[in-house]
Image (cartoon, grey):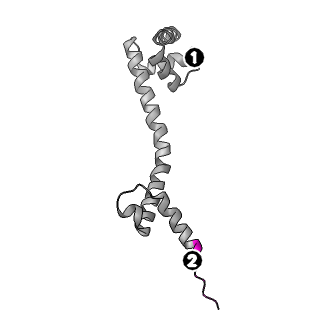
């Protein structure tokens, strides 16, 4: 039986992997086993953090909307409840953007939310 080396394919695989590890510190970018371990870990973190990023942004929007609502005499939960009852179809991201860039419009939203809750 003929012995198979797999030489070119293995070299291409290693080169591809080491290229992906470019920029890592020390042996993490130079040594095959260390680079492979580092990349596997990095891929796991990137998968996890794609979901975490969504959580963190939603939390940021909530903090911004809450702060803007409190300046107008409403709690965050009261504002959201009022928006639902007034059929204001803005999500938290949109509310945060309006609160930052158009305070007058946010004032009107808060007034409508207060009126809908009363």
Q: Where in the figure is residue 59, as x and y percent of width and height?
A: 43, 32
Label 2: which secondary element: helix
Closer to the camera, 60 or 82?
Answer: 60
Label 1: which secondary element: loop
Q: Is 60 left, or right, of 89 in this rendering?
A: left
Q: Is 13 left, or right, of 64 in this rendering?
A: right
Res 28 quadrant in image = bottom left
- Category of crowding for the residue at label 2, using alpha-carbon neighbours closer than 10 angstroms: few (below 14), some (14–19), many (at least 20): few
- Identify the magenta region: 1-9
Closer to the camera, 90 or 78?
Answer: 90
Closer to the camera, 17 or 103?
Answer: 17
Residue depicted at x 50% and y 63%: 17
Location of residue 4 with respect to 70 vertically, above or below? below
The residue tagged 2 is 7
Location of residue 47 with respect to 2 vertically, above or below? above
- Category of crowding for the residue at label 1, using alpha-carbon neighbours closer than 10 angstroms: few (below 14), some (14–19), many (at least 20): few
Residue depicted at x 51% and y 65%: 15
Q: Where in the figure is residue 26, as x and y percent of width and height?
A: 34, 61
**Furthest-bottom residue in view?**
1
Residue depicted at x 38% and y 20%: 67
Instruction: State the mark number for residue 65.
Output: none
Give the CA separation, mark 2 to mark 1.
64 Å
The residue tagged 1 is 88
The N terminus appears in which quarter of the rendering? bottom right
Location of residue 53 with respect to 91 vertically, above or below? below
Residue depicted at x 53% and y 63%: 16
Number of residue marks: 2
Let me know if residue 29 is in the magenta part.
no
SS majority, magenta: loop
Name the N-terminal-most of marks 2 and 1. 2
Q: Where in the figure is residue 101, as x and y percent of width and height?
A: 47, 17
Q: Where in the figure is residue 85, as x and y percent of width and height?
A: 56, 16
């Amino acid at each position: 039986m003929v012995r198979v080396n797999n030489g070119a394919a293995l070299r291409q695989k290693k080169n591809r992997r080491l290229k992906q590890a470019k920029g890592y510190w020390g042996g993490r970018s130079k040594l095959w086993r260390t680079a492979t371990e580092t990349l596997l870990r990095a891929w796991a973190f990137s998968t996890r953090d794609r979901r975490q990023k969504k959580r963190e942004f939603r939390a940021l929007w909530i903090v911004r909307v809450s702060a803007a609502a409190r300046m107008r005499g409403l709690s965050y939960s009261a504002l959201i409840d009022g928006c639902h009852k007034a059929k204001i179809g803005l999500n938290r991201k949109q509310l945060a953007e309006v609160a930052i860039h158009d305070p007058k419009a946010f004032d009107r939203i808060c007034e409508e939310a207060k009126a809908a809750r009363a």
